[in-house]
Amino acid sequence: MTKEQSLRSQIKPRFVDFLKAAELMYVHPELTNCPHCNRHASVIQDFMWSCPECHKYGDVVDYVMALEHLDSEWVAIKRICRTLQIKVTTLDVIHADELMDKQFENTGALIDGFIGRGVYLLAGSPKIGKSWLVLWLAHRVCLGEDVWEFKSRQCDVLYISLEDPERRIQSRVAEITRGETGNLWFATETELMGRGFEEQISGFLFEHPSVKFIIVDTLQKVRQLRADQYSYAGDYEVITQMKSLADRFGITILLVHHTRKAGAADPFSMISGTTGLSGGVDGSLVMIKDERMDNRAKLYITGRDTLDMEMELIFDRASSTWQFLGYGGKERVQKRDRLLSEVNDFLTDEGQFHGTASELLTILSARTELQIKSANALTRLLNPQKSMLQYEYGILYNFERTGKERTLHLTRIINDDSDDTLTPGKDTVTIVTEQK
Ligand SMILES: [Zn+2]
């Protein structure tokens, strides 16, 4: 019996234990929600579930694969084992060759170069205008419109506004959206984290799978502890819980938070609480008012998917929105990859490329000063840059392996009149034609 079979036989009889341990919704031990259609109708019998609504069925592994959109049984088995606290003693490894040959499905950032997927923190002093900023962000994203100079990827949005009553939200929405609201949802009350918040959010996301952006305004309001009870471990735990929610649904959660009163040389050290908060998130934004002019603010950004930036904003009272003035401090340095710019130049001349890696290497070596040792090395340099090519340069990159050689396909994504090169809300580009 393989390791996989042995673990499968251990977890199979524990379907109900798994539902309980994962705190998944089930009406009573014999009923759970169908992972496909989410109806309260999946009957668990003999360690299996079956759905009378959509007629799908399976065991706990099939259940988790459907629920978490996994394509690997082994990954599902490991997740179930972790939830049930069954030790998995094999260490999964991947050879560098295999890793470099992988092409990852790219969901793209929420707002390119600004806010990626995962958990982000926006901190600022009280009354600085954070709520105006996040409501505007929510609105731009749900219409798929640019956020200043950054492209957003359209999705529905949930704004959890715990410090403002509906009446105030209504008047803000009216000012910002001018009637065109998009699919924007609001909640003004939630349970606390660890006491129902996670279940409320998962339940909402199951019913609204097109929601990919959640704003929690403020983080303080969903935490159980009083401010003086915070610890590094507690802060880190809060972020970990938020992250597991974000990862499970492939969404972005933006947590609105306060800064300390005292100023600091490093804006990110002004985030209230311990470094467990800023250390655990995928990115942080800190908004600081310019003391000299009360309608101006600086927005500092750092994160995994963004370059460190310092932006100058001005609050436009006529439209109640924060407008972008410019980059302060150090100039924003665009990390331009030499290879990618050369590929881009080549495609600008040629429109497209379909051929082997060696052919591309010959072309690039003739055109440029690039020193790439082999065709293999070239594909390995290009592979991890698939999303960069797509979103920064508008080039669709794919390769197939045919025997020893690889066939590369490089196609320019068409620009229709708007400069929106991607179909909003889709991971894949649907309109691809060759440009002249
Ligand atoms: Zn079903």
Image (cartoon, rainbow, N blue to C red):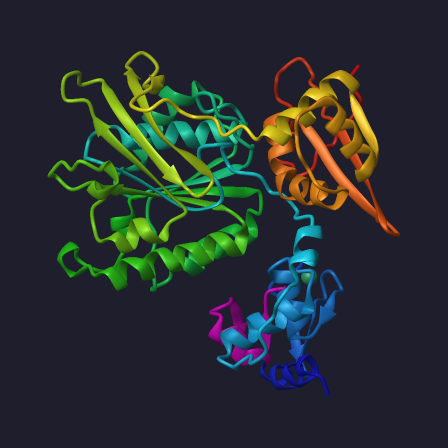
- Viewport quadrant of the N terminus: bottom right
Residue that sits furthest to the left in the current view: 262
Q: Position of residue 276 (x, y in %)?
A: 28, 56
Q: Is residue 269 magenta?
A: no
Q: Is residue 10 above or below residue 36?
A: below
Q: Is residue 113 above or below residue 323?
A: below
Number of on-image labels:
0
> In the visual, does 67 lie left or right of 400?
left
> In the visual, does 110 lie left or right of 321?
right
**Residue under the point 63% across and 30% down:** 340
> In the visual, does 141 lie left or right of 374?
left
**Residue under the point 72% across and 25% down:** 413
- Residue 376: tell me if it is visible: yes
- Viewport quadrant of the C terminus: top right
- Residue 424: tell me if it is visible: no
Q: Is residue 16 magenta?
A: yes
Q: Position of residue 169 (x, y in %)?
A: 33, 32
**Bounds of the magenta span?**
15-34
Q: Position of residue 139 (x, y in %)?
A: 45, 28
**Residue under the point 27% across and 56% down:** 223
Q: Position of residue 325 (x, y in %)?
A: 34, 15
Q: Is residue 257 above or below residue 417?
A: below
> In the visual, does 220 lie left or right of 61?
left
Q: Which sits in the foreground, 44 or 227?
A: 227
Residue that sits furthest to the right in the current view: 403
Image region (quadrant) for ligand 1: bottom right
**Residue under the point 70% across and 82% down:** 5
Q: Which sits in the foreground, 77 or 19?
A: 77
Residue 53 lies in what quarter of the image? bottom right
Q: Which sits in the foreground, 111 or 401?
A: 401
